[in-house]
Image (cartoon, rainbow, N blue to C red):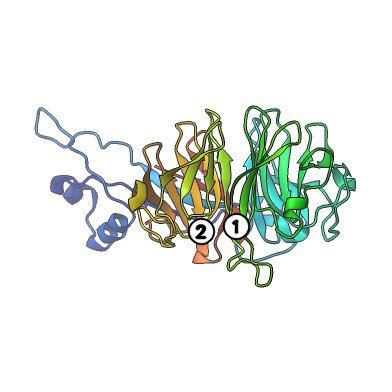
Amino acid sequence: MPISTSSSSLPTAARLRRRVISASALLALLSACGGGSSSPSSSSGDVGVLPPVRTASVTVIAGSPTDAGYTDGAGLSARFQSPQGITMDAAGNLYVADSLNAIVRKITSGGQVSTFAGKAGSPGAADGILATARFMEPASIGIDAAGNLLVADWLSARKITTDGIVSTIPGVGSGPMTWVRSEQVWGIAADRAGNIYLSNSTSTRLIAPTGVTTILESVTRDPVFGTPDIARRGITVDTSGGVYVFDLQNTVSRIDTSGRLTTLAGSAGVNAAADGTGTAARFQQVRALTADSQGNLFAADVDRVRKITPAGVVTTVAGKGSNLPLPNDVGSLWGIVADGKGNLYATFGNAVVKITLP
């Protein structure tokens, strides 16, 4: 059976509570799961038809939050080892960067988990056709407009075409991506024009289809002590083609067509967790970003899912600080993707979870 937690919105009218809920203990339990209001009316004075209850839930759909391993199979029988990045194709299949198994996994819409590319327990950097390719430690995964998968893989970036060819993405010209040779690539995304965006601990960069690399933001790395924090930073492209990144200032910013970053939400240099609008909001460490069909962003912010509206209003919708807890309250979030139908999928512990919002 799937593991799930849920919250509900209940009518607040005292008359309805007396008729619908007779046990005070049950009332307290349900009230803790969510709030709301309703005003049923009837010309005869009788109680009207109750409105549909809006519910939210978190359900484990594959793997186990606590048990690591490597097993292909159906839903909860499958095992992952530190799954991180996650994305979805047009057919509704999920693809997961199974980091410590050094492979890319596929989860069908029916919940069947299989190894899509690479070989479990055999890390490497070989290009080739799916099973013959090797990955070092895939951290995040995205998809471009043509349906090709993009994988941030340790010190490089990889591409898996729709016909199953795995290749290493070059940086400048035909040379290797020398700018990340000492920095793990954490975030990867592509816009409609075919530009690829990459983030690591010290920079955010754009690789044009021509191979030319442009630095969009950066900080200086100390040659002796390195950077104080090896920070994972999410990056995504919304349905209108807008590019968003958790920038080096600890804010969520939009990258315009000229490569300029403009803050949408968050306070520069402040590490915390607070809801609010614009600079009143605070983020801890946004490890992954995704966008829904309405232009809202959802951020995997350590142990919370944060929603960011196009107007910059930030709320916590799941995880710590919300009334929609994650299962077993273990681990933290690494990857997140929206399915365009009001649901989110995220990697958590050693599992993949579905988050249904009201």
Distance of label 1 from label 2 (alpha carbons): 7 Å
Taking 356 as reference, is 46 left or right?
left
Q: Quadrant of the N terminus?
A: bottom right
Please tell me which residue is depicted at 18% across the width and 45% down the height of the picture. Answer: 16
Count of marks overlaid on the render: 2
Q: Is residue 147 in view?
A: yes
Which residue is identified by label 2? Answer: 285
Task: Locate residue 168, reporting x and y percent.
Answer: 82, 44
Of residues 334 and 214, the one drawn nearer to the viewer in this rendering: 214
Q: Quarter-wise, where is residue 337 in the image? A: top right
Of residues 250 and 232, the one drawn nearer to the viewer in this rendering: 250
Mark 2, secondary structure of its residue: loop
Label 1 crowding class (10 Å Cα cut-off): few <14, some 14-19, many 20+? Answer: many
- Marks 1 and 2: CB-CB under 8 Å? yes
Please tell me which residue is depicted at 60% across the width and 57% down the height of the picture. Answer: 232
Q: Quadrant of the C terminus?
A: top left
Task: Locate residue 187, reporting x and y percent.
Answer: 63, 49
Please tell me which residue is depicted at 66% across the width and 29% down the height of the picture. Answer: 145
Using the image, determine if residue 236 lies above or below residue 62.
Answer: above
Task: Locate residue 218, reporting x and y percent.
Answer: 59, 52
Taking 126 as reference, is 27 left or right?
left
The kind of residue tagged 2 is Gln
Task: Locate residue 161, reporting x and y percent.
Answer: 79, 34
Label drawn at residue 232:
1
Please tell me which residue is depicted at 47% across the width and 37% down the height of the picture. Answer: 342
The kind of residue tagged 1 is Arg
